[in-house]
Image (cartoon, rainbow, N blue to C red):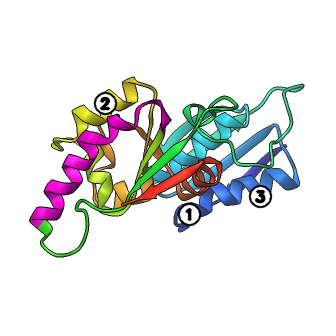
């Protein structure tokens, strides 16, 4: 029997949390989730994939239906939220997470702040292998989108194994979800869980 969930009108990360809680009560082999925005579609799909579901989605006018199917005999539901693969670093590795919350650094002159933040992103590679994840929220997500001069530097970090995450609800709010050039669309559940797993979190 297919478990059906209606997650329309829910803000991030509520759709993922709703799916997680429903599966915790009853880990169905088939699940159908209705959402009303692209960010929720991506986040719910990725969460189900991490729970060993084969996922397909379809467009229903302004809505999206995500259908997950898990074969008999696969592992049961994992209560803890599954992190993106790159966030599951091996034991003993130091993990620094950087959370970028704006397009500018500090308070005062915004033009100066924009320059400082861009230079900060360019210099992140100096953290070396300790840099584990860079997560973007609010207007900071624009650094991951088409037209940002920061994209090549973030692509270099991603090529070196650093996880780049951008809040899906924020990308959608600024109408740049389809312009993302680097990293992975994520939600607040992943970001909070990543902060818990990190050895240290730097917020700018």
Q: Residues within 10 Å of mark 1 (few under 14, many from 20)?
A: some
Q: In which quarter of the image is residue 185?
A: top left
Q: Is residue 33 visible?
A: yes
Decide whether the magenta segment is chiefly helix, strand or loop.
helix
Residue identifier under label 2: 155
Q: Which of marks 3 and 2 is in front?
A: 2
Q: Quadrant of residue 165?
A: top left
Q: How far apart are marks 1 and 3 (CA)?
A: 16 Å
Q: Is residue 179 visible?
A: no
* Viewer-proximal residue among 123 and 50: 123
Name the residue rendered at 57%, 60% in the picture.
13
Q: Is residue 91 left or right of residue 201?
A: right
* Viewer-proximal residue among 96 and 179: 96
Query: Which residues, given as a range, are shown in magenta?
Result: 111-131
- Element type at mark 1: loop
Residue 106 against residue 38 in the figure, above or below = below
- Element type at mark 3: helix
Q: Which comes before the other along the chain, label 3 or label 2?
A: 3
- Return the x and y of residue 42 as percentages of the image width and height: 50, 44
Residue identifier under label 1: 8
Name the residue rendered at 14%, 69% in the picture.
110
Residue identifier under label 3: 21
* Viewer-proximal residue among 145 and 115: 115
Q: Do the residues labelled 1 and 3 touch (CB within 8 Å)?
A: no
The residue at the far bottom in this view is 108
Q: Nearer the viewer, mark 1 or mark 3?
A: 3
């Amino acid at each position: 029997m297919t478990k059906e969930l209606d997650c329309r009108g829910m803000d991030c990360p509520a759709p993922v949390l709703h799916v997680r809680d429903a599966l915790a009560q009853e880990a169905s082999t088939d699940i159908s989730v209705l959402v009303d925005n692209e960010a929720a579609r991506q986040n719910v799909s990725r969460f189900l994939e991490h729970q060993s579901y084969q996922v397909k989605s379809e467009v229903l006018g302004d809505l999206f239906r995500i259908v997950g199917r898990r074969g008999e005999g696969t592992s049961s539901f994992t209560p803890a939220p599954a992190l993106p693969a790159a966030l599951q670093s091996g034991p003993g590795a130091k993990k620094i997470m950087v959370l970028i919350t704006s397009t500018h650094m500090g308070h005062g002159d915004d033009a100066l702040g924009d320059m400082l933040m861009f230079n900060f992103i360019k210099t992140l590679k100096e953290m070396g292998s300790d840099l584990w994840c860079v997560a973007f929220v609010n207007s900071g997500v624009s650094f991951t989108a088409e037209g940002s001069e920061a994209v090549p530097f973030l692509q270099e970090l991603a090529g070196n194994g650093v996880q780049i995450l951008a809040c899906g609800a924020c990308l959608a709010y600024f109408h740049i979800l389809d312009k993302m050039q680097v990293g992975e669309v994520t939600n607040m559940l992943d970001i909070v869980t990543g902060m818990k797993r990190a050895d240290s979190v730097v917020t700018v």
